[in-house]
Amino acid sequence: MSRKPQKVRGKARARPARRSLVGRIVRWALLGVLVFIIVGPMAVVAIYRVAPPPITWLMLQRAFEGRGFDRRWVPLKQISPQLVRAVIASEDSGFCQHHGFDIAAIEKALHHNAVSERIRGGSTISQQAAKNVFLWPHRDWVRKGLETWFTVLIEGIWGKPRIMEVYLNSIEWGPGVYGAEAAAQANFHTSAARLSPAQAARLAAIIPKPLAWRAAAPGPYVRRRSGTIVARAGVVRRDDLDGCVY
């Protein structure tokens, strides 16, 4: 009769101990998630505010595919304004007006994709920079969520000139060709600083399909698209749509 209360008390003491252990595990897990999602990305973005991103997921993938690797980082001041204007005209005319996301473009893309089999993107240059530098190339909801977070971070920590600089030094411009300097040399045997309006427009024109389209030897579609970009780049300059970069 006297032993039963002792067993009950033992179990009563064990339950709080187990709850305490579970609570500590949950707290440590939440702390790990916090560091992974918030602190880690903030630290990396802060480092890349001043240091060139060394390599991206896409570059690694292409290297394993045997496509080679040619990337020559140059500061923004050594990239022709013609290319900056052409890329803004081609990829994101509201680059200097938005804070990372173009809601109108996203809505248009969603409407188009709902009625068409050809997928259209609504990503800004900021979103593309975040995706190219920090994330893997395949689309999924996890990547899209992280892309949104990294876009917010680079807009706040880098600012527009650095976003443009990193973007132009990191995007794919052909098999194994990354960044404006490598692209200018590979296609036109000149530096990124000396690109003409027509050359800059051709490079901007092939950004959506850099493995299929060629800036040096463009097909009819790329030639037409390049002509449109030259005209739109003139509007970018006239209306100071690149003012946040310079």
Image (spheres, rainbow, N blue to C red):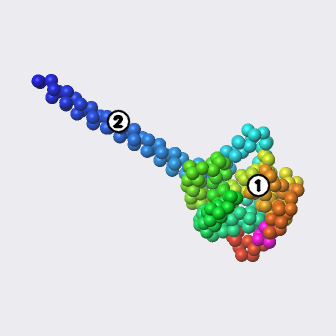
Q: Give the magenta part as a residue range.
A: 229-233
Tag count in the figure?
A: 2
Query: Is residue 13 or residue 137 the one in the foreground?
Result: 137
Query: Is residue 167 or residue 115 the one in the foreground?
Result: 115
Residue 125 shown left or right of residue 78 in the figure = left
The amino acid pointed to by label 1 is Lys
Point out the image quarter for the N terminus: top left
- The residue pinned by badge 1 equals 209
- The residue pinned by badge 2 equals 21
> Is residue 170 something one can see in this rendering?
yes
> Is residue 125 something one can see in this rendering?
no
Residue 241 shown left or right of residue 151 in the figure = right
- First-in-chain label (2 vs 1): 2
Most extreme residue toward the left is: 1
Q: Position of residue 115 (x, y in %)?
A: 65, 63
Secondary-structure class at tag 1? loop
Q: Position of residue 94 (x, y in %)?
A: 66, 68
